[in-house]
Amino acid sequence: GAWIAVVLVMVNAMYSRITIDAARSERLHSFAAGTSALRGQLELTLQETNIRRSRAMENARTNSTRILRALSAVLNGDAETSYNVRLPSLAESKDPTAGELFQILVHDSCHVLRNPSSYYSQCRALHEHFGLSGLLSFTTAMLDDGTQSTIIFDETNQSDSRGLMQMYRSGELAPVLGPLTRYDAKGEMAEILIRHLVNVTAAAAVSRFSSTWSDVQLVLGI
């Protein structure tokens, strides 16, 4: 009976830790999906006309909010998750994964990349050029560029029939060329960072399960 109690405590602890990692991973995937979708929505804002342009702008605005909420939930925690557990903030979590994510989100986005590597060098150069630090500041700057790239449009105007070439010839695109260039540079790096970031919590969950299962086998003498 005592052995069973020990095993149950260990399994329960394992379940709690893995569900927290899974909840964090879910938020990171939401961040990734939103970031990828945003690029397409901004492209549609430029290329479409009339109601389709208006809808693309609305979707881009909604997605920007989704992206920031997802990162905020990872950093600051969330009272509700689809796993029925409270997601603690990174600051109150004591596990190595939380420490690594805190470093990435707050201090250094490039920390998620292998160093040395070409990706790391590109990331470091981009961050130094724009004066960025962690992924939160990186994402906020990228979303700001995205917002500025649509300043020549009005989301409430569903009869804007100006085509891309027409706006280019008239010079109306000039105010958004800078923001678009900045967004493109950050967006390309964001895709690279995301591919590496979503693996952090997934790898942690696998490692924790393997470690705890080994302990359970040891206790049971398997």
Image (cartoon, grey):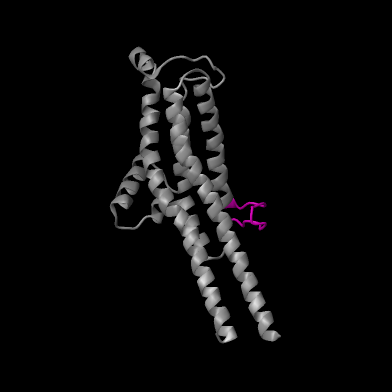
Q: Which residues are magenta?
A: 75-89
Q: Is residue 92 visible?
A: no
The x and y percentages for residue 142 are: 44, 37
Q: Is residue 166 above or below residue 32?
A: above
Q: Nearer the viewer, residue 95 or 205?
A: 205
Q: Residue furthest front?
A: 222
**Residue displayed at 61% across by 67% down:** 15
Residue closer to the observer: 218 or 179: 218
**Magenta span contains residue 66:** no
Q: As drawn, is 203 to the left or to the right of 11? A: left
Question: Residue at the bottom extreme?
Answer: 221
Residue 172 horizontal/vertical position (percent): 39, 16
The residue shown at (47%, 63%) is 203
Residue 87 included in the magenta stretch of the image: yes
Give the answer, above or below, for where 101 lies relative to 94: above
In which quadrant is the C terminus drawn?
bottom right
Residue 109 pos. (x, y %) = 42, 50
Q: Quadrant of the N terminus?
A: bottom right
Relative to 152, residue 63 above or below: below
Q: Is residue 199 above or below residue 127?
A: below
